[in-house]
Image (cartoon, helix red, strand yellow):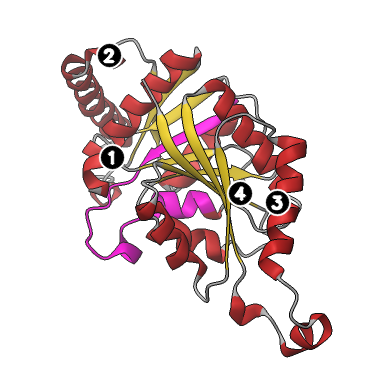
């Protein structure tokens, strides 16, 4: 059973905040969430001299907190215990990483605007540095989640994400499907026929699935799809399958095997995050990796 002791919601005072807060409420109504921290950082380096001269010694933190409180009144209500945290720090991502550690945050909710509205640079930095799982909510996403897709590569990270997806599906009555993207060693064509290579590759992957189902009986009845990369990246094929199957959420496991935080996110999650998709993306670290 999924229980979220502490959840952090990152607000940036843009038009997406209201949707993000409303989505947070929908999570609290469907999952046991003990406390939510609504967080905003006023980056002091972004405040120009003109701003200071015009507004003087205004208590900007209090003004921001009041604004967030109004949004919560309209879109969150008393869904669960919550607190507003407004800070004034030069480095937003480091400040938020510290909050995750201090309050033992298990899940961070991060809004994402389309690429024509934002570079997404801060979001990418947060994904790389936050020591917790992250749920990315695009501004065009829907609150109604009924179908979940979990790509796996048979690593421990992806299997952990699959177990979480199965628990989520059982808890909320969702449809869950697995996919695996495979590549062929094309450097050996035409020495080996493409048809034979495809047949052999799928045979190998199906054997892996059978072994996976034997060792994890809880996922034995979860349907899976094999998708050939065929000149496209794993991320591109994943997003295609996401659209084709009309899924409402994508769950990806993060490996975090590299001790350098900026190198631990992985190419597939990074590429998918940079795409304009309208599906929530749950990036999952296992508790052992976070520790």
Earlier sequence position, callout 1 versus callout 2: 2
SS state under label 2: helix
Q: Does residue 205 appear anywhere in the picture?
A: yes
**Closer mark to the observer between disc 1 and disc 3:** 3
Position of residue 261 in the picture relative to residue 16 (left or right): left
Q: Look at mark 3 in the image and give the residue it sits on.
A: 68
CA gap, disc 3 to disc 4?
A: 15 Å
**Closer mark to the observer between disc 3 and disc 4:** 3
CA gap, disc 3 to disc 2?
A: 42 Å
- Which residue is rendered at x = 40% and y = 49% of the image? 103
Residue 213: x and y, percent? 23, 17
For residue 111, the mark is 4
CA gap, disc 2 to disc 4?
A: 32 Å
- Which residue is rendered at x = 64% and y = 35% of the image? 23
Magenta stretch encompasses residue 261:
yes
CA gap, disc 1 to disc 4?
A: 22 Å
**Closer mark to the observer between disc 2 and disc 4:** 4
Q: Which residues are magenta?
A: 245-273
Earlier sequence position, callout 1 versus callout 4: 4
Earlier sequence position, callout 2 versus callout 4: 4
Furthest residue in direction right, as rendered: 54
Residue 243: x and y, percent? 59, 32
Magenta stretch encompasses residue 256:
yes
Give the total of numbered labels.
Answer: 4
Residue 55: x and y, percent? 81, 80
Earlier sequence position, callout 3 versus callout 2: 3
Q: Look at mark 1 in the image and give the residue it sits on.
A: 286
CA gap, disc 1 to disc 2?
A: 18 Å
- The reply to whether the C-beta atoms of the residues labelled 1 and 2 are less than 8 Å apart is no
- The reply to whether the C-beta atoms of the residues labelled 3 and 4 are less than 8 Å apart is no
């Amino acid at each position: 059973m999924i229980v979220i002791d502490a959840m952090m919601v990152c607000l940036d005072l843009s038009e997406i905040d209201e949707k993000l807060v409303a989505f947070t409420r929908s999570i609290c109504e469907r999952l046991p969430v003990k406390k939510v921290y609504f967080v905003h950082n006023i980056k002091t380096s972004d405040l120009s001299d003109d701003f200071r001269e015009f507004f003087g010694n205004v208590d900007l933190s209090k003004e921001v907190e009041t604004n967030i409180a109004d949004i919560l009144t309209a879109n969150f209500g008393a869904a669960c215990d919550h607190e507003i945290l407004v800070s004034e720090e030069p480095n937003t991502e480091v400040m938020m990483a510290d909050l995750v550690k201090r309050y033992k945050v298990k899940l961070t909710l991060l809004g994402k605007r389309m690429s024509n509205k934002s570079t997404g640079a801060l979001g990418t930095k947060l994904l790389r540095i936050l020591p917790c799982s992250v749920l990315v909510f695009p501004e065009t996403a829907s609150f109604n989640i009924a179908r979940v897709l979990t790509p796996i590569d048979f690593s421990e990270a992806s299997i952990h994400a699959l177990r979480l997806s199965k628990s989520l599906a059982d808890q909320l009555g969702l449809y869950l499907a697995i996919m695996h993207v495979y590549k062929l060693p094309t450097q050996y064509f035409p020495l080996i026929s493409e048809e034979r290579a495809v047949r052999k590759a799928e045979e190998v992957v199906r054997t892996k699935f059978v072994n996976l189902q034997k060792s994890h009986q809880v996922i034995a009845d979860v349907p899976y799809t094999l998708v050939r990369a065929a000149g496209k990246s794993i991320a591109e094929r994943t997003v295609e399958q996401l659209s084709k199957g009309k899924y409402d959420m994508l769950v990806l496991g993060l490996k975090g095997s590299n001790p350098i935080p900026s190198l631990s996110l992985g190419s597939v999650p990074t590429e998918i995050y940079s795409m304009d998709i309208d599906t929530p993306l749950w990036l999952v670290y296992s508790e052992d990796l976070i520790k």
